Image: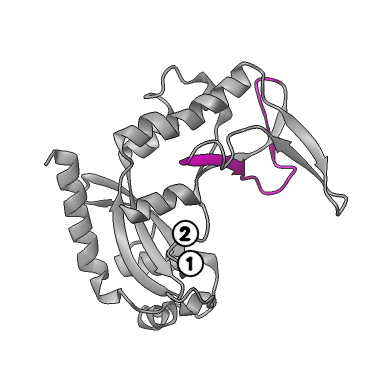
Amino acid sequence: MNQNKKLIVSAQIEIDKKISKYKGMKVSELKEILSMPEKDNKASFVQLARKMLGITNNKFSLCDNRVDAVLKTIRLTGMETPAEAMSFMPVDFKEWTEAVSWESSSLYRYFNEKTLVLFVFQQYPSGKRVDDSEMTFLDANIWKMSEYDLNHGLKEVWERVRYLINAEKLEITPVKQKSGKIINKNNLPSTQFNTLGHLRPGGMNGDDKVLLSTGQRIVKQRFWFNIEYLKEIMDL
């Protein structure tokens, strides 16, 4: 077993010691035990996870600072499929297009250096839809992106974005919706691009835009994991 795998195993053991007593509990029970407000919202899953770990930030260390960890939460449907994609960093188009190599890029460095701690909450196994307070905490899993995914699926997204901008092939098309609202569609990598990830708007609103080297203005974007990829991660 190489050093990286040993660290992952050690990190999992460290996490298990902290959260094993909470496994199988409903969100409402956890909130009572951890003295948290009853109000339900997406952020409460993150707050619960922090409370279970005894941390105050989503970025923290494990294994005596040898593992650079990031807290993430996943909500599963009753059929054990992630309910939604997972968001990550805002896309810095200037940095993405000007990076001298894949290994020097911020996207590569993030997933090469970070280890995710995935807190998993689930609907009833029957598939019945329930309030967030009735969802069950299943487990917390340590996960780090493989070398293969780093240099294939993830790199493909990065390369496609670079190509579209550097070759001036990026298309931004205004589309009028039934409501009369105008939205701008683009040909940046979508969920259909590959199984790993995609870009989607991540600004405060449709007017929160960034100027590209092409002279175009585009709504700020974020990088996301696809639901399909999250399912692969959960099945490992």
Please state the extent of the stretch shown in magenta in the rendering: 195-214
Q: Which comes sooner in the sequence, label 1 or label 2? A: 1
Residue identifier under label 2: 82
Q: Are marks 1 and 2 in contact (CB under 8 Å)?
A: yes
Q: Quadrant of residue 206?
A: top right
Q: Is residue 49 visible?
A: yes
Label 2 amino acid? Answer: Pro
What element does badge 2 sit on?
loop
Q: Is residue 22 above or below residue 189?
A: below
Label 1 amino acid? Answer: Thr
Q: Quadrant of the N terminus?
A: top left
Q: Is residue 130 above or below residue 212?
A: below
Residue found 32% across the figure and 69% down from its top: 52
Q: Is residue 64 visible?
A: no
Residue identifier under label 1: 77
Horizontal placement of 10 versus 125: left or right? Answer: left
Residue 45 point in image, percent of width and height: 45, 67
Q: Nearer the viewer, residue 204 or 45?
A: 45
